[in-house]
Image: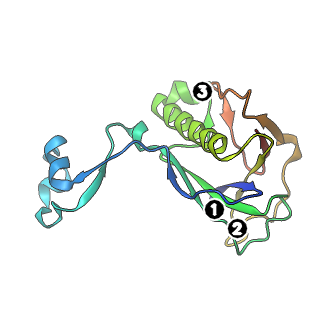
């Protein structure tokens, strides 16, 4: 099973990858800039036939983290959880949608990646909503193709105002949590 995350709005949103900080270059140039160690596959296998192909290069793991938005969903009944008609799947790409002091203590890198993904989520919403609009967020586990069978956990409901919201050091987008984000 997988925990899926969704954004619902009353208008179409842009899809794709957001927040990553990458450079596109030829593989041969990337290998010159970042030489592989002797145990890496590029040292063992002949990749010369790929040298002229473009590749994405990230200076840090945090640069590679971001957000991926796909949709809108067309084959799922989402009306039980969303009032808005345009429902998109949103994925943390390279991190998570959870940060805490405990995560920061155990794995500072996981904390940074989670914070980057959450920051990108709220930046994405801020850029694509205008004043007076709102988005609905929801997370749920998938059971095969069915993703919206269980009721939301109303104890976890949350309303955020993008104009005053500050992420801070503690945030977790939880299973069956419904969040309204106002702008």
Give the total of numbered labels.
3
Mark 2 Cα shell of 10 Å, populated few (<14), some (14-19), many (≥20):
few
Q: Position of residue 74 (x, y in %)?
A: 70, 73
Contact (CB < 8 A) between labels 2 and 1? yes
Q: CA distance from mark 2 to mark 3?
A: 30 Å
- For image coordinates 73% across by 58% down, the residue present is 11
- For image coordinates 13% across by 45% down, the residue present is 32
Q: Give the side of residue 74 with respect to residue 30, left or right.
A: right
Mark 3 Cα shell of 10 Å, populated few (<14), some (14-19), many (≥20):
few
Mark 1 Cα shell of 10 Å, populated few (<14), some (14-19), many (≥20):
few
Q: Which mark, by number, is residue 1?
A: 1
Say if residue 133 shows up in the picture. Answer: yes
Residue at numbered disc 3: 102
Contact (CB < 8 A) between labels 2 and 3? no
Task: Label 2, secondary structure: give it.
Answer: loop
Residue at numbered disc 2: 143
Q: Position of residue 141 (x, y in %)?
A: 70, 58
Of the image marks 2 and 3, the number of the one nearer the N terminus: 3
């Amino acid at each position: 099973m997988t925990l899926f995350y969704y954004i619902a709005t009353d208008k179409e949103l842009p899809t794709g990858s957001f927040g990553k900080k990458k450079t596109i270059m030829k593989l041969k140039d990337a290998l010159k800039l970042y030489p592989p160690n002797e145990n890496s596959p590029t040292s063992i296998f002949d990749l010369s036939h790929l040298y002229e192909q473009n590749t994405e290069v990230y200076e840090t793991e945090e640069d590679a983290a971001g957000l991926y938005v796909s949709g809108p969903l067309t084959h799922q009944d989402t009306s039980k959880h969303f009032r808005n008609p345009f429902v998109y799947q949103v994925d943390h790409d390279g991190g998570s949608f959870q940060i805490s002091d405990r995560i920061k203590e155990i794995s500072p890198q996981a904390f940074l990646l989670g914070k980057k993904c959450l920051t990108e989520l709220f930046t994405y919403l801020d850029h694509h909503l205008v004043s007076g609009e709102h988005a609905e967020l929801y997370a749920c586990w998938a059971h095969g193709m069915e993703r919206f069978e269980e009721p939301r956990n109303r104890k976890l409901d949350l309303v955020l105002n993008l104009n005053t919201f500050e992420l801070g050091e503690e945030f977790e987008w939880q299973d069956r949590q419904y969040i309204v984000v106002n702008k």
